[in-house]
Image: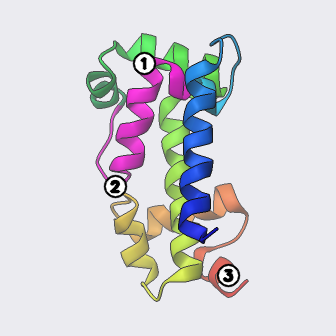
């Protein structure tokens, strides 16, 4: 089976699992089932560099800030903006290792207004400066 066919099969399998799940479990797949959290996750994943605020995420999800925050914490154990930070840093880590983009370009691509603020956040969450991570 070609790699693309295997990937499609995995995605279809995950989609079917999410559709058939009773909805009582917690975690990332359960969060996708929740209409509020699922819409917020889709927005963050589609546009990670957007200048998201909790209010903007709430509008995207069709819920108040407090409902969005409560459901994120219930399903994922983290606040929406905390999740966004982790998602951006995961994307940045991948870009640092797989592209020739400068650290400033990576910072901008994942939604940081400055290289300095990106570097501080990256080091705080990853434990290494972006340049060290890239070499690793």
User: Can you tell which mark lies on residue 53?
Assistant: none
Question: Label 2 to label 3, Cα distance in Å?
Answer: 23 Å
Q: Find residue 30 and report its image quarter.
A: top right
Q: Which residue occupies 46% across, 79% down?
A: 103
- The tag earlier along the polypeptide, 1 or 2, is 1
Magenta region, main secondary structure: helix
Tag 1–tag 3 contact (CB < 8 Å): no
Q: What secondary structure is found at the residue carrying circle 1?
A: helix
Q: Within 10 angstroms of label 2, few (less than 14), some, or many (20 or more) residues? A: some
Which x, y percent locates residue 48?
38, 51
Q: Within 10 angstroms of label 3, few (less than 14), some, or many (20 or more) residues? A: few
Work out which quarter of the rendered image holds the N terminus and state it: bottom right
Tag 2–tag 3 contact (CB < 8 Å): no
Q: Which residue occupies 46% across, 61% down?
A: 117
Q: Which residues are magenta?
A: 31-53
State whether residue 9 appears in this view: yes
From the viewer's perspective, is residue 110 above or below residue 77? below
- The tag earlier along the polypeptide, 2 or 3, is 2
The residue where tag 2 is placed is 49
The residue where tag 3 is placed is 132
Which x, y percent locates residue 109?
36, 66
Q: Is residue 1 magenta?
A: no
Q: Within 10 angstroms of label 1, few (less than 14), some, or many (20 or more) residues? A: few
Q: What secondary structure is found at the residue carrying circle 3?
A: helix
Q: What secondary structure is found at the residue carrying circle 2?
A: loop
Q: Is residue 45 magenta?
A: yes
């Amino acid at each position: 089976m070609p790699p693309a066919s295997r990937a499609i099969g995995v995605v279809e399998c995950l989609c079917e699992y999410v559709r058939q799940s009773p909805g009582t479990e917690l975690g990332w797949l359960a969060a996708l089932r929740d209409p509020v959290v699922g819409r917020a996750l889709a927005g963050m994943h589609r546009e990670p560099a957007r200048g998201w605020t909790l209010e903007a995420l709430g509008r995207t999800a069709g819920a108040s800030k407090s409902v969005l925050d409560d459901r994120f914490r219930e399903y994922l154990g983290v606040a929406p903006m905390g999740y966004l930070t982790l998602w951006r840093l995961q994307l940045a880590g991948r870009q640092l290792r797989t592209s020739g983009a400068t650290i400033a370009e990576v910072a901008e691509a994942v939604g940081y207004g400055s290289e300095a603020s990106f570097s501080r956040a990256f080091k705080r969450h990853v434990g290494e400066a972006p340049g060290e991570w890239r070499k690793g």
